Amino acid sequence: MDDFSRQIYSQVYQIPIGKISTYGDIAKFSGFPGYARQVGRLLSNLPQGSALPWHRVINSQGTISLCGDGRARQIEALRNEGIIVTEQGRVSLKVYRWDGYPE
C-alpha cells in the first residue's frame, strides 16, 4: 500500500461515529491538500463490506456524491449513526462536520 492510501485510510478510520468529513478535509488532514478527487476515487474502490467508515465522507457541499445502491447504503449507514440526512442526500456540515481531532 502506498503512503497516500495509508494516510487517507488512517484519517477516515478516525472519524467518530455521528460525525462526517469531506473528501477535501480528509485530503488536507492527511497532508495532501487539493487531492479531494483522489480521496473519492480511493474510497470508491474499497471492497464491499470494508470495515473502514467510508460512509462518513461526503462532498464539500454537504451532499452524498454516490448514486444508486451506494447512495442508499451511505444514507442508511449515516442515519443509523444518528446523522440527519435529507431525502436529497444533504447533511448539515455545520452540525456534523468533524474537525480532524480525535475525540
Image: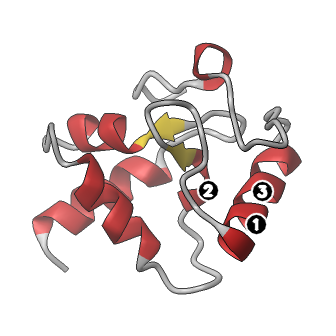
Q: Which residue is drawn at the image coordinates 12% and 65% (left, top)? A: 3
Spot occupied by residue 94 in the image (x, y as percentages of width and height): 60, 13
Badge number at residue 77: 3
Residue annotated with mark 1: 73
Mark 1 nearby-residue class (10 Å; few <14, some 14–19, many ≥20): some
**As shown in the figure, which amino acid type bears the numbered disc 1?**
Arg
Marks 1 & 3, CB-CB < 8 Å contact:
yes
Within the image, what quadrant is residue 99 found in?
A: top left
Q: Where 7 falls versus 27 (above or below)?
A: below
Number of residues whose C-alpha sits closer than 10 Å to that of mark 3, classed few (under 14), some (14–19) or many (20 or more): some
Residue at 53%, 65% in the rendered image = 52
In percent of the image, x 70 and y 71: which residue is there? 68
Secondary structure of residue under mark 2: helix
Q: CA distance from mark 2 to mark 1?
A: 8 Å
Which numbered mark, 1 or 3, is in the foreground of this view? 1
Residue 9 location, quadrant: bottom left
Residue at 58% x, 22% y is 93
Q: x%, y% of residue 28?
A: 22, 35
> In the structure shown, which secondary structural element does the residue marked by tag 3 occupy?
helix
The reply to whether discs 2 and 1 touch (Cβ–Cβ < 8 Å) is yes
Q: Amino acid at mark 3?
A: Ala
Looking at the image, residue 11 sits to the left or right of residue 87; the answer is: left
State the image coordinates of residue 17 (x, y, percent, origin top left): 69, 41
Q: Residues within 10 Å of mark 2 (few under 14, many from 20)?
A: some
**How far apart, in angstroms, are the residues tagged by discs 1 and 3?**
6 Å
Labelled pair 2, 3 in contact (Cβ < 8 Å): yes
Q: Residue 55 has which mark?
A: 2
